[in-house]
Amino acid sequence: MMKKNIAVSKETREKIAKLFNVTMRSVWNALNLDYPETDLTKRIRKVAKENGGVVMTSIPAGEAIHFFDGTMRMEFDNGAILEFYRKDGTGHIYVKGAEVEVYENVTLPMIYEIKERAAALR
């Protein structure tokens, strides 16, 4: 499940707490977008965004992130990173920054197999 929140600096959170006369915990809850929306949380979120807050989303391990340059990247709990490059049709598995496997002419069915391989590395 993806979690969403508004990321702001500690100083901004303190400013918001003082502005609305609430605890830091209340600010943290309001910035957690899974928290129920009330009039106060709406106002806190608005002020946070006006002060440089950015909506962030965390994704599950192994979930693909697609970049504008044609790169697809997956990160796994075991520390493996899997990258596919549309430009040259290759796939690469990295562990602790070192390239451990390279795949040429990657097709869609191969992606699932390579993903399983990366997730199984220890």
Image: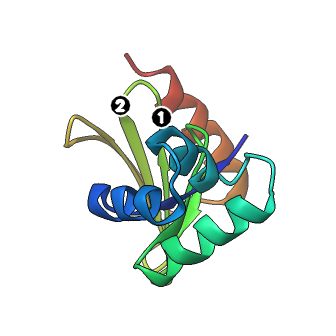
At x 45% / y 55%, what residue is drawn? 17
Quarter placement of the N terminus: top right
Circle 2 crowding by C-alpha within 10 Å: few under 14, some 14–19, many from 20: some
- The answer to whether one can see residue 122 in this image is yes
Extreme residue toward the top, this view: 122
Q: Which label is found at residue 79?
A: 2
Report x, y in % for residue 94.
30, 42
Secondary structure at badge 1 equals loop
Q: Which label is found at residue 91?
A: none
Determine whether 108 is above or below 71 in the image.
above
Secondary structure at badge 2 equals loop
Circle 1 crowding by C-alpha within 10 Å: few under 14, some 14–19, many from 20: some
Q: Which label is found at residue 76?
A: 1
Residue type, label 1: Phe
122 sits left or right of 114 in the view: left
Nearest the camera: 103 or 16?
Answer: 16
92 sits left or right of 119 in the view: left
Nearest the camera: 55 or 35?
Answer: 35
Q: How is the image coloured?
A: rainbow
Image quadrant in which you'd find residue 95: top left
48 sits left or right of 32 in the view: left
Report x, y in % for residue 89.
49, 69
Quarter placement of the C terminus: top left
Q: CA distance from mark 1 to mark 2?
A: 6 Å
Nearest the camera: 40 or 115?
Answer: 40
At x 53% / y 76%, what residue is drawn? 47
Report x, y in % for residue 20.
54, 62
Whether pointer 1 and pointer 2 mark residues with C-beta atoms closer than 8 Å, the reply is yes
